[in-house]
Image (cartoon, rainbow, N blue to C red):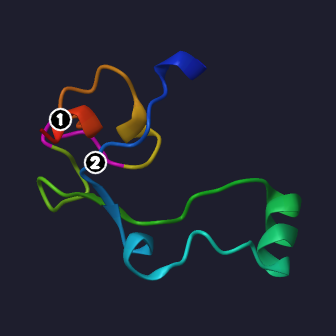
Amino acid sequence: MSNDDRRPPCLELRCKEMFYKDISATPTEHERAMSAAFGKWDTRSYWCGCTQDSRGPDQKPVNQEACSRAGRPCYKALEHLA
């Protein structure tokens, strides 16, 4: 995927981390060590705010990468709020 295909994630993308984790906090020593050893990985469970399911209105899986792609018909960005 090229960088120009990437956008901020859809406004309807949800995960538990949004509700309990302070993402502004600096990573712990353990988190830095794990990232250095294994690279970046994502084990979060995502769901769509529209469907309340792990698949979006287009019946495709939802996750941070998939919900940031250009061309996904259900994508909602900040300009769609008005």
**Amino acid type at image mark 2:** Leu
Left or right of 45? Residue 76 is: left
Residue at the spot 47% in from the left edge and 20% down from the top edge: 5
- Name the residue that disc number 2 marks: 11
Left or right of 43? Residue 33 is: right
Residue at the spot 53% in from the left edge and 17% down from the top edge: 4
For the record, the magenta segment spans 57-62
71 versus 13 height, above or below: above
Residue at the spot 44% in from the left edge and 31% down from the top edge: 7
Residue density around tag 2, few if under 14, some if 14–19, many if 20 or more, within 10 Å: some
Across and down, in percent, residue 22 comes to 54, 77
What label sits on residue 42 in the rendered view?
A: none
The rendered magenta stretch, by its main secondary structure, is classed as loop
Across and down, in percent, residue 65 comes to 47, 40
Across and down, in percent, residue 60 comes to 25, 39
Q: Secondary structure at mark 1?
A: helix
- Name the residue that disc number 1 marks: 80
The answer to whether marks 1 and 2 mark residues whose Cβ atoms lie closer than 8 Å is yes
**Amino acid type at image mark 1:** His
Which of pointers 1 and 2 lies earlier in the amino acid sequence? 2
Q: Secondary structure at mark 2?
A: loop
Across and down, in percent, residue 79 comes to 23, 32
Residue density around tag 1, few if under 14, some if 14–19, many if 20 or more, within 10 Å: few
Residue 61's image quarter? top left
Magenta span contains residue 46 = no
Q: Nearer the viewer, mark 1 or mark 2?
A: 1
Residue 39's image quarter? bottom right
For the image, the number of numbered tags is 2
